[in-house]
């Protein structure tokens, strides 16, 4: 339930989120981004604050199964949503195939963008397997092929300041073949 609060008339709302399989409730200013709700209110630090403008992808999570940049959306817009961060991809101590591939292919580098890269890669492969075309898919009437250009285009919303793109590409290929 929303209610006025504060000297400037800021409004707060109680929301519930399923974060990495755990039901969480919180009260936020309605202007709070989903990223800030996760990091500042719930201490979920897997999504990173990078550019805060949706340009770097460091804050990418899976939001109801689809990849999303959490700095560009308000938390209140996702009341009741299921959020999976890179932390939530693992099954206990067993890494998700994408996480394991990033480790084995040394796609981590400094690690700051890694959690967003991994969530985006998992979501990207789901989109690919559902046969969603990308901007570089040449034949829109046939199932797309997982070429290097397809992977690069589909991952273009995630930047790596270390320039580990070759290793990230190899990791995604390894996970796709797992």
Image: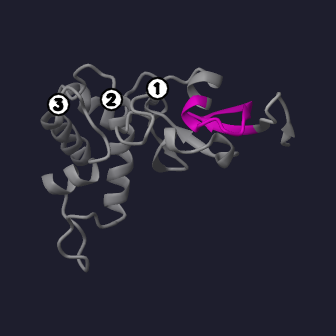
Task: Name the residue beneath numbered marker 2.
Answer: 113
Q: Determine whether the residue tagged by mark 2 lies in a helix, strand or loop.
A: loop
Q: Distance between the residues labelled 2 and 3?
A: 10 Å
Who comes first in sequence, dot 2 or dot 3?
Answer: 2
Looking at the image, which residue is at 20% across and 49% down?
152
Q: In this view, does 15 lie to the left or right of 120?
A: right
Asked which colour scheme the image uses, the reply is one colour
Query: Residue at (70%, 45%) from the top-left corner?
Result: 79
Please report whichever mark, 1 or 2, sits nearer to the chain's N-terminal start: 1
Tell me: 53 left or right of 41. left
Residue placed under numbered mark 1 in the picture: 46
Position of the N terminus by quadrant: top right
Label 1 neighbour load within 10 Å: few <14, some 14-19, many 20+: many
Q: In terms of sequence position, does the residue under pointer 3 or pointer 1 come before the other?
A: 1
Residue 22 among those drawn in magenta: yes
Q: Is residue 112 left or right of residue 136?
A: right
Asked where in the image residue 126 lies, by quadrant, the reply is bottom left
For residue 164, the mark is: 3
Q: Nearer the viewer, residue 92 or 168?
A: 168
Q: Which of 111 and 3 is in front in this view?
A: 3
Residue 98 appears at what percent x and percent y? 31, 37
Q: Residue 171 carries which label?
A: none
Magenta stretch, residue numbers: 15-36
- What number of labels is visible? 3
Give the left or right position of residue 78, taking residue 143 as reference: right
Task: Name which residue lies at 43% across and 27% down.
Answer: 48
Q: Is mark 3 on a helix, strand or loop?
A: loop
């Amino acid at each position: 339930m929303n209610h006025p609060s504060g000297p400037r008339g800021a409004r707060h709302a109680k929301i519930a989120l399923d974060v990495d399989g755990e039901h969480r409730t919180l009260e936020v200013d309605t202007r709070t981004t989903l990223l800030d709700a996760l990091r500042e209110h719930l201490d979920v630090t897997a999504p990173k604050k990078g550019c805060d403008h949706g340009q770097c992808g460091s804050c990418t999570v899976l939001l109801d199964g689809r990849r999303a940049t959490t700095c560009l959306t308000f938390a209140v817009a996702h009341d009741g949503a299921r959020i999976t961060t890179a932390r939530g991809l693992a099954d206990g101590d067993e890494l998700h195939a994408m996480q394991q591939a990033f480790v084995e292919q040394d796609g981590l580098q400094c690690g700051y963008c890694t959690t967003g890269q991994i969530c985006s890669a998992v979501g990207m492969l789901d989109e690919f397997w559902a046969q969603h075309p990308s901007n570089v898919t040449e034949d829109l009437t046939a199932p797309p092929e997982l070429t290097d250009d397809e992977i690069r285009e589909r991952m273009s919303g995630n930047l790596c300041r270390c320039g580990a793109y070759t290793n990230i590409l190899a990791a995604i290929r390894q996970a796709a073949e797992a």
